[in-house]
Image (cartoon, helix red, strand yellow):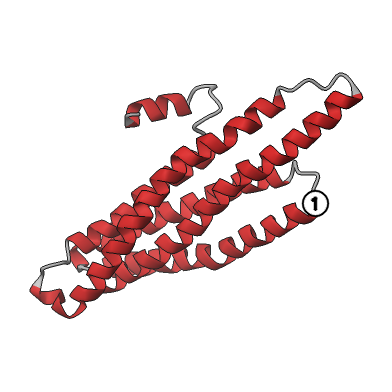
Amino acid sequence: MTKGDFVSVLASKEPVPGGGGASALVGAIGAALGNMVGSLTVGKKKYADVEADIIRLKKASDKIQGDFLTLVQRDAEAFAPLAKAYGLPKETEAEKAEKTKVMEAALKVACSVPMDIMRKCGEAIKVIEEFAAKGSSLAISDAGVGVLFCKAALTGASLNVFINTAAMTDKPYAEQVNREANALLAEYEPLADKIFKSVKDRLK
């Protein structure tokens, strides 16, 4: 769909796209902004000594962007069974047991994609760190905006993880997922902040 269609559906009562898909899209935009720094660096004599590094980073960023866009669609597909499960009847004990079983499976599927989004954000932030350090100083602001977007996508996706794990009856599984999500936040939020501060300080 067009960006206008996406935003309109996002604002509606439709269950998808939601926060997960929006986070993946924001991550793709953030990664692309980092990639823009690379595009404005390649071929410049001033940055000839880092040309090979920039080309490597651009290839990595191209893949990350594509992966993020795939995750936009995957998030919608993963949430659909959960949305359907919420509507299952629970009048009898048998229906309650069936709904609990279906819900648990659907929650795990719905949780898997925002976890992938979080992991992908970590990859993107590390790539942007290098773009910011080695890329053209004329495009440094784009690296700052890009890392800010990727941090927002990381943090946003985490909320989609936590809302699903909170509803799980399999508490050991939920705790395991929460541990990884919290570890990703602990590693990459401070790194994103550090990169953003570095960019901001260079612009003053």
**What is the tally of numbered marks visible in this picture?**
1
Q: Quadrant of residue 195?
A: bottom left
Q: Is residue 40 left or right of residue 5?
A: left
Q: Quadrant of residue 40?
A: bottom left
Say above or below: 149 vs 46: above
Q: Is residue 93 left or right of residue 53?
A: right
Q: Is residue 204 visible?
A: no
Secondary structure under badge 1?
helix
Residue at x 74% of width, y 45% of height: 166
Say above or below: 184 vs 21: below
What amino acid does circle 1 point to? Lys
Instruction: Depth check: give the residue in front, 198 or 85.
Output: 85
Q: Quadrant of residue 131?
A: bottom left
Q: Is residue 81 visible?
A: yes
Q: Position of residue 18 (x, y in %)?
A: 52, 34
Residue at x 79% of width, y 48% of height: 170
